[in-house]
Amino acid sequence: MSGGVDSSLTAALLKEQGHEVVGVYMKNWTQDLPGMRCPWAEDLADAKRVAVQLGIDFRVFDFETEYRDKVVQYMIDEYKSGHTPNPDIMCNQEVKFKLFLETALEQGADAIATGHYAATKEGKLLQAADTNKDQTYFLYRVSGNALASTLFPLGQYTKPEVRAMAEERGLYTAGKKDSQGICFVGQIGIREFLSQYVETKPGDIVDIQSEKIVGKHDGAIFYTLGQRHGLDVGGGLPYYVVGKDMDKNTVYVTTNLNDESLWQTQLRLASLHWINDAPNENQTYQVRIRHRAPLVDCTVQGNTIVLSEAQRAITPGQSAVIYDGEICLGGGIVV
């Protein structure tokens, strides 16, 4: 129970279904940052209040050390290498569906449940009914064994339905806003967070066509492929980031939206993970190259994904997730 409406309703529904429910708050991050107070204490208090409302036992699992090592350091290292990682995916892989699951089972649980918008069936991961809120993209690195011991009670509901159901039950968190920003810090942006851990310096923004310097940046680490806003390059047509050289601390841009650097018809993946079985190389699947990006037909040939149509700004460090209809098969990290 994170202290949000989704996990609160999850606990309520499970209790109504007759399960013996224990609420667990995972203490993953408690550090304040300059100008931003970490909301963990308030979230913990909200989770406790709902547990009291429901009359269920409540525990706190302290995973802060493991979280810093497995998720936070991973994110920092990836950004330093010039990639754009997704810490939510690593959190699910290393903490929620590994460390949390193992600890819960050790303490006598039969299964874990979360407020994710997803569904499971026979160890397979299925998309949620609410396609706008579907979170299978973030869950693709979870194992089939873990899914077999996991319940997703919200998979059949839309977010407005979840809010309404929480209000009907008078849950304390029914009107609480969803958290934004970095998964473990709250409202703070990635630039502000990285600035606390990575030393950066100004560098050149170079037009890849004319090879002329068109502006200055405050650290190449902060920029991602396809980015338009925040470049501070004035006048004329808008510029888009098409590449970075981390050794030279240079960001490359173009005004040409059709620049070949921005579009790809195939991509290579590292750290492949298939939830159950690997895809058939002769079959057509669908791929999502970022959260909420449209699904695109593709074929899977080893660690190469061949797309049916070119896609813009496929970003190293992000994940490409493969689907067979409503079933999430798995995927890998773009290189």
Image (cartoon, helix red, strand yellow):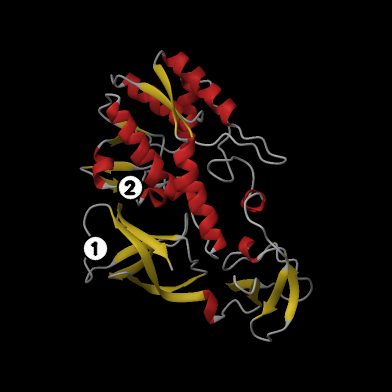
- Give the foreground label among 1 and 2: 2
**In the shown orientation, is residue 249 left or right of residue 110?**
right
Q: Is residue 2 above or below residue 325?
A: above
Q: What element carries label 2?
A: loop
Q: Which of marks 1 and 2 is nearer the N terminus?
A: 2
Per the image, the residue denoted by label 1 is 279
> Looking at numbered disc 1 in the image, what kind of residue is underneath it?
Pro
> Looking at numbered disc 2 in the image, what kind of residue is underneath it?
Val
Q: Position of residue 289 (x, y in %)?
A: 44, 62
State the residue at coordinates (50%, 43%). Answer: 68
The quadrant in which residue 241 appears is: bottom right
Q: Distance between the residues labelled 1 and 2?
A: 16 Å
Q: Is residue 227 above or below residue 33?
A: below
State the residue at coordinates (66%, 35%). Answer: 37
Viewer-side residue, 251 vs 278: 251
The quadrant in which residue 247 appears is: bottom right
Q: Residue 142 carries which label?
A: 2
